[in-house]
Image: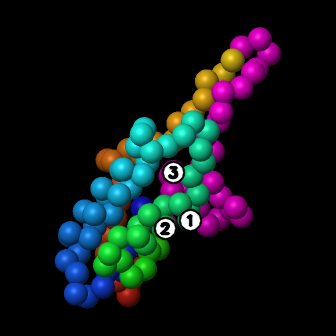
Amino acid sequence: NAAIKIAPDYTAGKVLGLIKEALIENFSFESRDFGQQVTPSDVVSIIHDITGVVAVKLMILGGQDPYTIAHFSLISEVARWSGNTILPAELMLIDPNQITLSIWTDEN
């Protein structure tokens, strides 16, 4: 969940669409590594790379407020032993249906 401040000379719908596409691409199977964590700065930098974005206010990441914990990150495990069992690696991907973007206004 993020609020986006968009430059006045850009179309909000187009910019939000480009942001969603960039997030989906950057957090796809082909773009991620097993065991790779996700930090708020990862998400914010992807959004800031979109032309027309002036500012980003990231409010929710992985169902949590990412600014309530110092050094917040979503952890993805690498393959590891647990006793006599190998636990599988995890791959942190994004669910396109869970991307919530809004226009940053003076009220939010």
Label 3 to label 1: alpha-carbon separation: 14 Å
- The verdict on residue 27 being magenta is no
Q: Badge 3, how many Cα within 10 Å: few under 14, some, many 20+? A: few
The residue under label 1 is 41
Name the residue: 38% across, 87% down. 106
Q: Secondary structure beneath disc 2?
A: helix
Q: Relative to the observer, which residue lies in front, 95 or 30?
A: 30
| Residue 78 position in % (x across, y down) | 65, 33
The extreme right residue here reads 83
Name the residue: 60% across, 29% down. 89
Residue type, label 2: Ser
Name the residue: 71% across, 14% down. 85
Residue type, label 1: Ser
Name the residue: 77% across, 11% down. 84
Q: Badge 1, how many Cα within 10 Å: few under 14, some, many 20+? A: few
Q: Identify the colour scheme used.
A: rainbow
Q: Which is more N-terminal, label 1 or label 3?
A: 1
Between circles 3 and 2, the one closer to the viewer is 2
Q: Which is more N-terminal, label 2 or label 3?
A: 2
The residue under label 3 is 62
| Residue 36 position in % (x across, y down) | 59, 44
Q: Secondary structure beneath disc 1?
A: helix
- The verdict on residue 72 being magenta is yes
The residue under label 2 is 45
Residue type, label 3: Gly
**Magenta highlight range:** 59-85
Whether 108 is drawn above or below 71: the answer is below
Q: Secondary structure beneath disc 3?
A: loop
